[in-house]
Amino acid sequence: MITAIVLINADVDKIPEVAQAIAELPGVREVYSVTGDCDLIALVQVEHHDDFADVIADRLNKTPGVRSTQTHIAFRQYAASDLEEAFSIGLD
């Protein structure tokens, strides 16, 4: 699976509705309402890079209430155990 993190700016008065609509899209795994420079963050997972066009460009970006998005495609995933192992290298 390939993961993208999508930062979303939405109409302020429609954030809960926009978040719910996005959460129901195929390929969207999670949606968070956040503070900071964006209103929502969505985690999108697809099998192939080309599938991002369908999920993000053709559906998520066209969701009513979405004003703009910024997409970050992940190339590596770290888990807490991975980080512990990475930082313990050479400490013995």
Image (cartoon, rainbow, N blue to C red):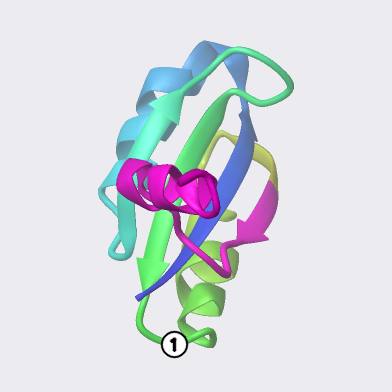
Single out the residue that lies furthest toward the front.
92
Give coordinates of residue 7: x percent, y percent. 62, 40
Residue at the location (53% across, 63% down)?
56
Give coordinates of residue 45: x percent, y percent. 37, 65
Left/right of residue 27 with respect to residue 53 in the rendered view: left
Q: Which portion, as a residue range, is magenta?
A: 70-92
Residue 82 position (above or below residue 76):
above
In this view, the residue in front, 27 or 77, is 77
Res. 46 image quadrant = bottom left
Judged from the image, the secondary structure of the residue bearing numbered disc 1 is loop
| Quadrant placement of the N terminus | bottom left
Residue at the location (25% across, 49% down)?
24
Residue 2 position (above or below residue 60):
below
Residue at the spot of label 1 = 48
Residue type, label 1: His
Residue 59 position (above or below residue 6):
below
Left/right of residue 42 with respect to residue 24 in the rendered view: right
Residue at the location (43% across, 32% down)?
18
